[in-house]
Image (cartoon, rainbow, N blue to C red):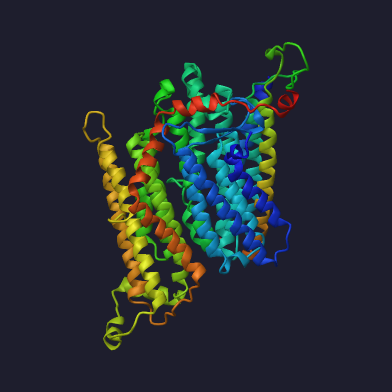
């Protein structure tokens, strides 16, 4: 059930994101990119296999059974990807505002077709 | 651990520290900021030279730097082998030229130019050095974030408009990068490039489709950055809109995509990859050929010089990708030589275009084009009257540089452009196993020769219009020494590559051999020894 929910979430987010990315208004493009970023982050997370109720960080001392833990690497990757995605999206937003101010249009080409 | 052991990470640390340091000072202290920036870039050049000398030792394996002293598959590694060292040197040379050029006036064109420039260098160097896929993503983002800022340097409607396209395309490509990396991690459980090369042959058959999908998606992300057709429509606009020194340093950015493909394709999907061996090679070859064709048509169709050079970037990237697609050590060696030569040439041309364009008045340019199109030539009478008019010295010098660029770009003898293309073609035609020349090699041969011819035609046309028969209203451009010197430096490097072609060819041959038989690389990374911890040393 979790697998199905997650797959649907990734699919819906990415699908809507791609559709919005191909729209002509800058606002739609940036919302589309954000949605794709959410979809991709969930996707990275799912690549560490879905486990619920298990910790990613090993306990101190003694022998450990790797099967009792979830993969911590994708979680670290997701954190990095979120930070980078957030920063670049913010930067893109600034450029869009500049473009809106300079061209007087929110079309991606800077002029109405 | 000696200080010299940390040389491997210096190309990342030096720009990072310099860029951050420059942020502390007020924007108005131009002289101080320029001095620090130039000093750091020259320092980088020296470091890159030392790394090349270190990498180019007979039979040496890659020098591996363990970040945080974690052993190879678990921690992140930096690897300096011949290819990385060569790319570092190329970047540093181009950066020096672009930076010196920008000192004339461009560096005052917007805030934080020097910091952004250093961060771009940090991202480039990091991408060339890292031995880890996710770290490659991080450095790509660093260099892209800096390039977004530099792309908009100087502002203006055109720059913002094309800058927006550039950012949107690259953000989308970064998402593909992440999907590809996570798919590969999901199948193999590692992100270390050397460890991946070991694990990929052992991937079970039912996971192989997923793995190949992952590498393909990752490849698309690299190829978008390299400007492959049909993912390249953002490139000519963005590159010709960027300020001249920025465009010059951008000419290495498409090569980052090519570098990533060149590094990963033989390593992960080379002969040792079992069922996935040479996956994607034929696609790469065909896409490269189409890109070359598209770029050539663009070169021929361009009226503005900056667009002509931008399309030359595409031709160069297409040639390299097609050469990588041939997956042959000899062809790769030729491609590396060609890459060095074409990157320097295109960098010089971007700088030159700005100088030449100063003599052009946009209205006169349109007029000249229209006259050409209608076969109307009112200049004929004017020429009769102006017998014996002297050519201004500035225009003459710029003209000579332009001719050199034309020769290099089209691959005419005797300069390095010719040597690069000759090495590519002679290796491509002898690449077959049984001595027979494959159809693809013939296609590559034809497209490469024709692209050279068309580049010559386009350059001749622009040259005639600009230098031989300048528009009536043309003014002699004022060119400062600091603007001319970088162009001369880059062209002198191409000439030096021609004169010292033997050692350079030997270097790229060794590079290509180690790329196509990566056992030494893998062994070197995975067996890198940890440095003894300081605690243990003091305990003794």
Q: Is residue B60 above or below residue B147?
A: above
Residue B394 or B529: which is nearer the viewer?
B529
Whether residue B269 can be seen here? yes
The image position of residue A7, as x and y in percent, is 63, 27
Q: What residue occupies the far front of the structure in this picture?
A: B540
- At horizontal 51% and vertical 35% (from top left) the residue drawn is B218
Residue A56 or B342: which is nearer the viewer?
B342
The image position of residue B465, as x and y in percent, is 35, 72
Residue B359 or A41: which is nearer the viewer?
B359
Residue B249 or B238: which is nearer the viewer?
B249
The image position of residue B66, as x and y in percent, is 61, 31
- At horizontal 49% and vertical 29% (from top left) the residue drawn is B213
Q: Is residue B87 above or below residue B510?
A: below
- At horizontal 31% and vertical 60% (from top left) the residue drawn is B456
Q: Quadrant of residue B371?
A: bottom left
The image position of residue B313, as x and y in percent, is 43, 53
Q: Is residue B159 left or right of residue B445?
A: right
Whether residue A24 can be seen here? no
Q: Quadrant of the N terminus of chain B?
A: top right
**Image mark count:** 0
Q: Is residue B337 left or right of residue B165?
A: left
Q: Is residue A94 above or below residue B536?
A: below
Q: Quadrant of the C terminus of chain B?
A: top right
Q: What residue occupies the far right of the structure in this picture?
A: A60
Q: Quadrant of residue B76?
A: top right
């Amino acid at each position: 059930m979790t697998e199905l929910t997650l797959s649907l979430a990734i699919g819906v987010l990415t699908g809507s994101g791609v559709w919005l990315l191909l729209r002509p208004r800058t606002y739609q493009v940036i919302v589309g990119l954000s949605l794709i970023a959410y979809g991709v982050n969930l996707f990275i997370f799912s690549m560490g296999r879905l486990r619920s109720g298990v910790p990613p960080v090993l306990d101190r001392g003694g022998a450990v059974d790797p099967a009792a833990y979830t993969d911590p690497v994708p979680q670290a990757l997701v954190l990095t990807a979120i930070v980078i995605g957030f920063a670049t999206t913010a930067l893109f937003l600034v450029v869009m505002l500049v473009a809106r101010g300079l061209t007087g249009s929110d079309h991606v080409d800077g002029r109405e077709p | 651990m000696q200080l010299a052991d940390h040389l491997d990470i210096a190309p990342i640390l030096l720009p990072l520290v310099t860029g951050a340091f420059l942020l502390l000072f007020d924007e108005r202290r131009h002289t101080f900021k320029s001095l620090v920036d130039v000093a750091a870039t020259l320092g980088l050049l020296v470091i890159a030279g030392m790394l090349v000398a270190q990498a180019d030792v007979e039979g040496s394996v890659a020098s591996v730097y363990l970040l945080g002293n974690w052993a190879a598959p678990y921690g992140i590694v930096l690897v300096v082998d011949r290819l990385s060292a060569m790319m570092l040197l190329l970047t540093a040379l181009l950066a020096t030229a672009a930076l010196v050029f920008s000192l004339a006036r461009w560096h005052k064109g917007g805030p934080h130019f020097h910091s952004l420039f250093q961060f771009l260098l940090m991202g480039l160097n990091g991408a060339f050095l890292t031995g880890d896929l996710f770290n490659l993503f991080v450095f790509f983002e660093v260099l892209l974030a800096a390039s977004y800022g530099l792309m908009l340097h100087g502002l203006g409607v055109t720059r913002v408009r094309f800058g927006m396209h550039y950012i949107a395309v690259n953000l989308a490509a970064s998402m593909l990068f992440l999907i590809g990396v996570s798919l590969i991690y999901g199948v193999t459980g590692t992100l270390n490039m050397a460890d991946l090369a070991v694990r990929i042959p052992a991937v079970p058959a039912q996971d192989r489709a997923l793995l190949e999908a992952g590498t393909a998606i990752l490849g698309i992300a690299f190829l978008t950055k390299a400007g492959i057709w049909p993912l390249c429509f953002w490139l000519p606009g963005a590159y010709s809109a960027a300020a001249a020194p920025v465009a010059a340093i951008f000419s290495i950015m498409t090569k980052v995509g090519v570098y990533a493909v060149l590094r990963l394709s033989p390593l992960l999907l080379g002969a040792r990859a079992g069922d996935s061996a040479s996956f994607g090679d034929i696609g790469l070859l065909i896409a490269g050929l189409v890109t070359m064709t598209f770029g050539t048509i663009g070169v021929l169709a361009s009226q503005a010089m900056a667009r002509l050079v931008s399309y030359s970037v595409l031709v160069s990237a297409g040639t390299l990708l097609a050469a990588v697609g041939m997956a042959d050590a000899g062809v790769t060696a030729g491609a590396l030589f060609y890459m060095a030569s074409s990157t320097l040439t295109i960098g010089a041309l971007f700088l030159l275009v700005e100088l030449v364009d100063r003599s052009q008045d946009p209205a006169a340019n349109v007029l000249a084009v229209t006259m050409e199109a209608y076969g109307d030539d009112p200049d004929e009478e004017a020429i009769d009257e102006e017998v014996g008019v002297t050519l201004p010295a500035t225009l003459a010098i710029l003209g000579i540089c332009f001719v050199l660029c034309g020769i290099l770009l089209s691959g005419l003898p005797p300069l390095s452009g010719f040597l690069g293309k000759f090495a590519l073609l002679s290796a491509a035609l002898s690449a077959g196993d049984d001595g027979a020349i494959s159809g693809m090699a013939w296609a590559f041969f034809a497209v490469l020769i024709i692209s050279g011819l068309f580049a010559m035609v386009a350059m001749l046309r622009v040259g005639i219009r600009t230098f031989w028969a300048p528009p009536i209203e043309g003014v002699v451009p004022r060119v400062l020494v600091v603007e001319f010197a970088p162009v001369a430096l880059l062209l002198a490097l191409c000439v030096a590559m021609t004169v010292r072609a033997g050692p350079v060819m030997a270097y790229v041959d060794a590079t290509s051999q180690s790329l196509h038989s990566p056992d030494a690389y893998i062994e070197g990374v995975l067996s890198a020894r940890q440095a003894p911890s300081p605690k243990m040393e003091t305990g003794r």
